[in-house]
């Protein structure tokens, strides 16, 4: 038998992890009042709005495999229930590994994340087979120019537009009376005479201070989560090892990828291609998406410091030029239409696996329910729904739908 549901839950961070948590919590516990606090002047201005939106079911290390599988299935179900193909560009995807030789790089777990090698290593346990790349890629038109292996199909990979999905989830939460405070910065917690958490103080853009009732606090602020934690719990003994793996990206169009890959209401399927470009010095990842655009990334760095959440960070023109050169090479087209040049910070942990845990009084110095979810790295979109559901279940003291026992501090 579950304990009484929390009365007032405050979620700090309105990225896709935060709104996914609010989405499932509002479904499982309609009586709970949910407050979402976001400091950035623009919603979904970091990874939640700028990531590729690639989804995988079984590309994860043992610690996060159960969560990854659950989340992929939830993405599919959500799309089926809410016309996700039209609403946020959900489509099945076929993934390919492209190389110029038979050699492969050894690796395990999340090694690829820090070594700069291809994410396709995570699919190395699958049955690979030779398969021609799609024609919108140059290698798909120049047969025999490279080795192409199909490493997954529609059963285990898919694609979304993360910005549209995040916006959908937020609208659903607000329709169930979740309240959004934006832009607003958390400044401190309020405790009772017996040191029990009772509220969260925030400051809005005009300088007004407001105290929100809070008996359960969730921190989902991406790379800013450790700063928020330190601000709210200055005497805490726990340290949240979440840092940044920042990435550059391009969104572009090519005449060889359809602007409307739908036949009626059915997606024709998207594609993902992973390779390593030794000349460029990184491992490009390129994705065709159901909205008719193509997303190129893979150029990552840990050298760009994380500014205040309210500050906008412009991409380095030299790094964007590196991406453009790779785009022309991979697509075989000098006349590509560049729609967006992007840069964002993705939260990662030292282990490469996400953090999903509760923090007790011994860690925070305050008695009350405090939860942290973050550090998903490049898998934040893919794992978002599973994280939101499991976190909601744990808060309600229900049996979680995935094994996250290895995702604690």
Image: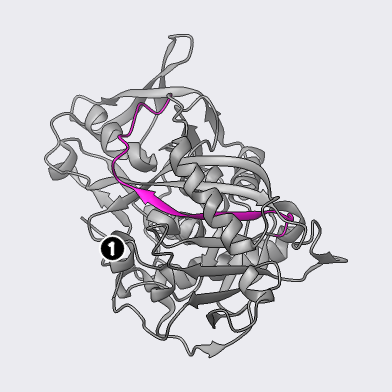
Front one among 400 and 41: 41
Front one among 88 and 299: 299
Tell me which secondary structure the magenta stretch mostly adopts: loop
Farthest residue in the right direction?
A: 264
Residue 16 part of the magenta segment: no
The quarter in which the C terminus is drawn is bottom left
In this figure, which residue is indicated by the disc labeled 1?
A: 115
Residue at the location (69% across, 75% down)? Answer: 141
Q: Is residue 155 above or below residue 183?
A: below
Residue 301 part of the magenta segment: yes
Residue at the location (46% across, 78% down)? Answer: 100
In this rendering, does residue 52 appear at all? no
Place residue 396 in its image quadrant.
Answer: bottom left
Label 1 SS: helix
Front one among 231 and 94: 94
In this rendering, does residue 296 appear at all? yes
Residue 157 picture location, percent across and down: 56, 72
Place residue 231 in its image quadrant.
Answer: top left
Residue at the location (33% across, 36% down)? Answer: 224
Magenta residues (range): 290-310
Residue at the location (42% across, 60% down)? Answer: 390
Q: Is residue 140 left or right of residue 65?
A: right
Image mark count: 1
């Amino acid at each position: 038998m579950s304990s009484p549901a929390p009365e007032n839950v405050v979620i700090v961070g309105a990225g896709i992890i935060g709104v996914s948590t609010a989405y499932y919590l509002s479904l499982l516990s309609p009586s709970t009042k949910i407050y979402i606090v976001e400091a950035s002047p623009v919603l979904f201005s970091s990874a939640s709005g700028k990531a590729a939106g690639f989804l995988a079911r079984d590309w994860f290390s043992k610690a996060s495999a159960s969560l990854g599988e659950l989340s992929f299935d939830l993405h599919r179900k959500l799309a089926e229930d809410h016309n996700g193909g039209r609403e946020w560009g959900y489509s099945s995807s076929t993934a390919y590994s492209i190389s110029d030789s038979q050699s492969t790089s050894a690796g395990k777990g999340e090694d690829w994340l820090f070594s700069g090698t291809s994410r396709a290593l995570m699919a190395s346990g699958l049955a690979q087979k030779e398969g021609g790349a799609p024609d919108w890629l140059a290698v798909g038109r120049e047969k025999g120019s490279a080795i192409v292996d199909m490493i997954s199909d529609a059963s285990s990979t898919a694609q979304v537009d993360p910005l549209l999905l995040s916006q959908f989830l937020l609208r659903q939460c607000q329709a169930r009376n979740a309240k959004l405070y934006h832009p607003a910065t958390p400044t401190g917690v309020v405790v009772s005479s017996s040191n029990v958490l009772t509220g969260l103080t925030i400051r809005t853009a005009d300088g007004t201070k407001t105290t929100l009732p809070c008996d359960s606090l969730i921190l989902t602020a991406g790379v800013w989560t450790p700063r928020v934690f330190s601000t709210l719990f200055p005497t805490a003994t726990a340290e949240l090892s979440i840092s940044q793996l920042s990435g550059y990206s391009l969104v572009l169009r090519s005449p060889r990828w359809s602007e409307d890959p739908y036949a009626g209401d059915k997606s024709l399927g998207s594609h993902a291609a992973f390779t390593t470009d030794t000349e460029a010095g990184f491992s490009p990842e390129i994705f065709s998406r159901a909205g008719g655009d193509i997303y190129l990334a893979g150029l990552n760095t840990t050298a760009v410091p994380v500014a205040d959440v309210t500050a906008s960070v412009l991409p380095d023109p030299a790094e964007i030029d590196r991406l453009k050169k790779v785009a022309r090479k991979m697509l075989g087209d000098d006349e590509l239409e560049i729609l967006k040049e992007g840069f964002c910070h993705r939260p990662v942990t030292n282990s490469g696996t996400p953090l999903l845990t509760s923090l007790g009084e011994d860690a925070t110095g305050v008695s009350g329910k405090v939860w942290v979810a973050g550090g998903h790295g490049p898998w934040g979109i893919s794992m978002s729904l599973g994280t939101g559901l499991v976190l909601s279940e744990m808060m309600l003291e229900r049996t979680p739908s995935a094994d996250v026992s290895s995702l604690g501090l």
